[in-house]
Amino acid sequence: MPQLHLPIFPSGLTYINNQIGVEKKDGRIYYFHGLLPVFSHEEKDIESFRYITSQLVQAGNVSQLEIVKAFGVSCISVKRAVSRLRKQGLEGFTQKAKGGTAYVLTAEVAGRAQKVLNEGHSAGEVARQLGLKVSTVRKTTGAGRLHKKNSILRRQSCCCKQCGTEQK
């Protein structure tokens, strides 16, 4: 898996080229066009860094190579950020990554899976019969949405939030 190269922000004003400068001051990064400040962000805000440097490249104020040399980031990360700006605009840098969802395991499929588990079959057998991934069945069993046959008796006296039953 590739390693993220964090940008290196030198303290004091440093010129990326003869028009654009960057300065690190009190944990913030300031970008200047000549003497005019154009943008700032927190030092650890990588998405803002990617956004502003992509804007500078797209506007023709700096080249991708100048960004790579000035901040010590990888060439491919700059290319990807510029591509993301062109395709998605600002939203490409502000949206949170979508998490995985269990669309496969609908209420109907979960009911059929529970019936097969109640018959004493393993998670692998349930997955094979219903055309699911074994990991899907195991994860939902581990999360308490499905219960193995041998755990049904234990579940009746359980008072945990995971299986939703209360002790009587």
Image: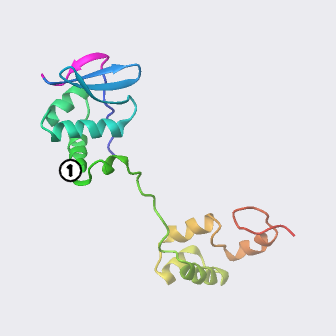
Q: Amino acid at mark 1?
A: Arg
**13 in magenta:** yes
Q: Would residue 21 appear left or right of 119 to someone viewing this image?
A: left
Q: Secondary structure at mark 1?
A: helix
The answer to whether 138 is drawn above or below residue 97 in the figure is below
- Residue bearing mark 1: 86
Q: Where on the picture, by quarter, is residue 63?
A: top left
User: Residue 3's x, y, as percent?
Assistant: 34, 40
Q: Would residue 105 appear left or right of 167 to someone viewing this image?
A: left
Q: Where on the picture, by quarter, is residue 48?
A: top left
User: Residue 1's x, y, as percent?
Assistant: 34, 46
- The reply to whether residue 4 is in sight is no
**141 in magenta:** no
User: Camera-side residue: 9 or 87?
Assistant: 87
Taking the view exactly as shown, the residue that stands out farthest to the top is 12
How many other residues sit within 10 Å of disc 1, few (<14), some (14-19) or many (≥20)?
some
User: Residue 114's x, y, as percent?
Assistant: 62, 80
Image point 26% across, 17% down: which residue?
13
Q: Would residue 62 appear left or right of 89 to someone viewing this image?
A: left
Image point 41% across, 23% down: which residue?
27
Query: According to the image, what is the colour scheme of the structure?
Result: rainbow
**Quarter the C terminus occupies:** bottom right
The answer to whether 156 is drawn above or below residue 130 in the figure is above
Image point 20% across, 32% down: which residue?
68
In magenta, the rendered stretch is 10-18
